[in-house]
Amino acid sequence: MTAKTIDGKEFAARVRSQVGEHVARLKNDHGITPGLAVVLVGEDPASQVYVRSKGKMTVEVGMKSVEHKLDADTSEADLLAVVEQLNNDPEIHGILVQLPLPKHLNEDLIINSISPAKDVDGFHISNVGLLGTGQKSMVPCTPLGCLMMLRDHHGSISGMNAVVIGRSNIVGKPMAQLLLNDSATVTIAHSRTKDLADVVRRADIVVAAVGRPEMVPGDWIKEGATVIDVGINRLDAPEKGEGKTKLVGDVHFESCAERAGAITPVPGGVGPMTIACLLANTVTACCRANGLAEPEGLTA
Ligand SMILES: Nc1nc2c(c(=O)[nH]1)N[C@@H](CN(C=O)c1ccc(C(=O)N[C@@H](CCC(=O)O)C(=O)O)cc1)CN2
């Protein structure tokens, strides 16, 4: 079998277009413009690129975009003050603090200082608890994007065997919870899992989110399974020229694509869905803040 490639760029463009339609409706019918604030601390090059894209796409869908760029040595107190000001700003419906933060800042403390209703990353402990108990919450963007792609491809994933490789708080655990909430049978695998190959071979859905380049080979994949690759690993690529790099996922694309029914590529798979879902979450947060109906198909 040769897998269908799930085009995350095209899917994300569709989600952004739906978000744009909702934003237009909020403006025309209610005079409300959703607002997203992104806070960047320091000069991490990848984070700068992501924050620039977030700002650009926020404006493209018609929302208000606010960026706070703080020095790498910003104190915890100063960062908390910025978040507090955004918590109290009625024109801001979503707040995101770009991760990773510089080492001297306590990530949990900062994330939990964001108002849960404006926590469009879904990382606040209240949102983690709500998701974990199957209640309405803000859902982390990358797992939400994976879920949207799975629902689109399968219709329903109820009863399917899913394995999530990786147990991070921002991808692995919320991903497993979302799959469970959709009635899949879920296994979370990690570095201590015994016989990982056998665990993966039983799965109808494989979500790889470990951050280890190409660690899942094709012969682990059940014939016809759906493979969602969350990994974004930058490797040296001397074959492309001196100093050149390339991006690869956590699965070995070519060999997995020979056995899978569907697979997401890297780049151009899950990555673009992350920002599209951030915009979707901001519209959702805005609707909830104003007691309006939430956009259909853009939430978990
Ligand atoms: N507060 C947050 N911080 C971080 C998150 C997050 O969801 N919230 N996720 C990542 C970074 N990220 C968004 O912030 C992100 C990562 C990757 C992509 C993406 O589109 N990737 C492209 C490849 C891009 C490249 O060439 O480097 C792809 O996969 O096709 C978008 C957003 C960590 N921090």
Image: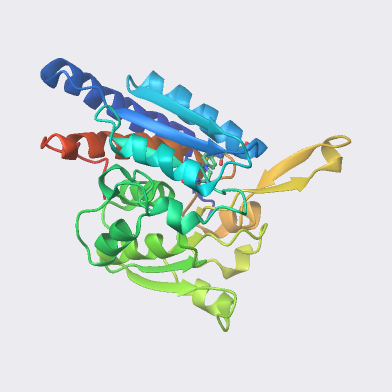
> Which residue occupies 41% across, 29% down?
13
Number of marks in picture: 0
Looking at this view, is 76 or 100 the one in front? 76
Looking at this view, is 105 or 121 the one in front? 105
> Can residue 227 be seen?
no
Looking at this view, is 39 or 214 the one in front? 39
Which residue is outermost to the top?
28
In this rendering, the answer to whether 113 lies above or below 222 is above
Give residue 231's position: percent from left, percent from top. 58, 53
In this rendering, the answer to whether 51 lies above or below 224 is above
In this rendering, the answer to whether 84 lies above or below 138 is above
Give residue 6's position: percent from left, percent from top. 46, 43
Which residue is outermost to the bottom?
194
> Which residue occupies 31% across, 28% down?
35
- Drawn side of residue 189 relative to residue 177, left or right: right
Give residue 49's position: percent from left, percent from top. 59, 32
Quadrant of residue 108 within the rendered picture: bottom left
In this rendering, the answer to whether 253 lies above or below 23 is below
> Can residue 64 be seen?
yes
Which residue is outermost to the right?
242
- Drawn side of residue 113 relative to residue 252, left or right: left
